[in-house]
Image: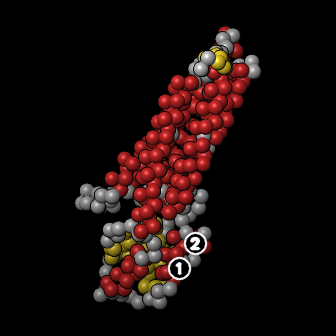
């Protein structure tokens, strides 16, 4: 019996490790939103006229985007495939990733231009940012010390709490959005240090440090926006499946090819792996040794590939001669890297 191909249906349930990681990710995202909302409120009360503090305040608001995108996309990801959406809704994570990156890029550029304009105005007009004193419990202190103290405390969350936690969960779920969120959190210390430097610069009479710190923070936001937009766009355009951090081709491709190599009836094989956001759709092209191939053998290969890893949700096995040039092949050493 000959066949044009065989389709393996989607897995209905995540393994226990991934279910636990997903529950943990949701809890950390909710915690992050609550934590960041508190920091935004606190900074709003203490930032005064400091450009660096104001830019850090905007950065905190923008940092909510990945968490909101993750939580909004999650119900869509759980939907079953339908006739209108035969590949499922897994791309929702990628769309959320792209929207968050685009917002970061757009607002970051605006803040960079605004901060640069403020610094230039200070040079030509002689206007200087000043931080006054406040009275607390009958004692007069410089407000800048409050700003520095607040920023030093705020950084504890992203650096030592939810940042590392999300970085551990991201590879378990193969979540690039969660990894980008964790990476941005780990970089928050740069924003904190820059804002502290800007405030201390005002206190020391080095007025331009505040504007320079604001520009540094804004450039960091732009950098995050560019990297997130680039990664999201490439994935949405069906780039070859890569690891959760985007650093290399995903090793699962090599595992699939190794499995195909062990099938005695296959003379040559190639694969095409589509990263849907957290799961993979795999197309397997095989050139059998014989002129005909049974449905049973195609089904066996499809099920065997699907059982290699939880991320493999759909598998299509197609007899082909020749194997398409764009497919990763058995003799392609890079596929297993």
Q: Quadrant of residue 195?
A: top right
Q: Earlier in the sequence, mark 1 or mark 2?
A: 1
What residue is at 64 percent from the left and 18 percent from the top?
139
Q: Quadrant of the N terminus?
A: bottom left
Residue 104 appears at what percent x and percent y? 51, 37
Mark 1, Cα crowd under 10 Å, few <14 / some 14-19 / many 20+, is few
Mark 2, Cα crowd under 10 Å, few <14 / some 14-19 / many 20+, is some
What residue is at 74 percent from the left and 18 percent from the top?
205
What residue is at 50 percent from the left and 63 percent from the top?
172
**Residue where numbered disc 1 is placed:** 258
Q: Secondary structure at mark 2?
A: helix
Observer-nearest of 18 and 176? 18
**Residue where numbered disc 2 is placed:** 336
Residue 259 appears at what percent x and percent y? 49, 81
Residue farthest to the front, as pictured: 138
Say above or below: 303 vs 136. Answer: below
Whether tag 1 and tag 2 are in contact, CB under 8 A, the answer is yes
Observer-nearest of 154 and 331? 154
Q: Estimate the spatial distance between the alpha carbons at disc 1 and disc 2, rounded to whole Å.
A: 9 Å
| In the image: residue 10, left or right of residue 208 | left
Say above or below: 216 vs 305. Answer: above
Residue 174 appears at what percent x and percent y? 49, 60
| Residue 224 is at least partly visible in this image | yes
Say above or below: 290 vs 235. Answer: below
Q: Quadrant of the C terminus?
A: bottom right
| In the image: residue 189, left or right of residue 287 | right
Residue 245 appears at what percent x and percent y? 56, 56
């Amino acid at each position: 019996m000959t066949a044009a191909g065989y389709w393996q249906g989607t897995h209905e349930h995540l393994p226990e490790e991934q279910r636990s990681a997903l529950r943990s990710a949701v809890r950390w995202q909710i915690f992050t939103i609550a934590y960041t909302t508190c920091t935004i409120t606190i900074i709003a009360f203490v930032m005064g006229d400091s450009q660096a503090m104001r830019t850090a305040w905007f950065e905190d608001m923008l940092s909510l985007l990945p968490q909101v995108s993750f939580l909004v996309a999650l119900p869509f990801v759980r939907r079953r495939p339908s006739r209108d959406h035969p590949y499922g809704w897994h791309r929702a994570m990628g769309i959320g990733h792209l929207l968050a990156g685009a917002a970061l890029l757009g607002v970051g550029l605006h803040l960079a231009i605004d901060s640069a304009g403020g610094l230039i105005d200070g040079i030509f007009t002689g206007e200087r940012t000043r931080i006054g004193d406040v009275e607390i419990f009958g004692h007069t202190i410089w407000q800048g010390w409050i700003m520095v103290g607040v920023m030093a405390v705020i950084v504890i969350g992203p650096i030592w709490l939810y940042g590392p936690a999300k970085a551990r969960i991201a590879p378990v779920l193969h979540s690039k959005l969660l990894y980008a969120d964790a990476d941005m959190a780990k970089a928050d210390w740069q924003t904190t240090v820059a804002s502290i430097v800007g405030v201390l610069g005002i206190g020391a009479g080095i007025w331009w440090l505040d504007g320079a710190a604001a520009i540094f923070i804004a450039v960091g936001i732009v950098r995050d926006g560019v990297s997130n937009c680039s990664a999201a766009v490439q994935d949405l355009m069906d780039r070859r499946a890569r690891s959760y951090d985007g650093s290399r081709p995903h090793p699962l491709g090599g595992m699939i090819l190794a499995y195909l190599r062990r099938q005695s009836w296959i003379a040559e094989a190639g694969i095409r792996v589509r990263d849907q956001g957290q799961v993979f759709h795999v197309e397997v092209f095989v050139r059998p040794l014989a002129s005909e191939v049974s449905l049973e053998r195609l089904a066996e290969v499809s099920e065997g590939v699907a059982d290699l890893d939880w991320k493999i949700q759909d598998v299509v096995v197609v007899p082909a001669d020749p194997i398409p040039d764009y497919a990763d092949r058995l003799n392609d050493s890079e596929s297993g890297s």
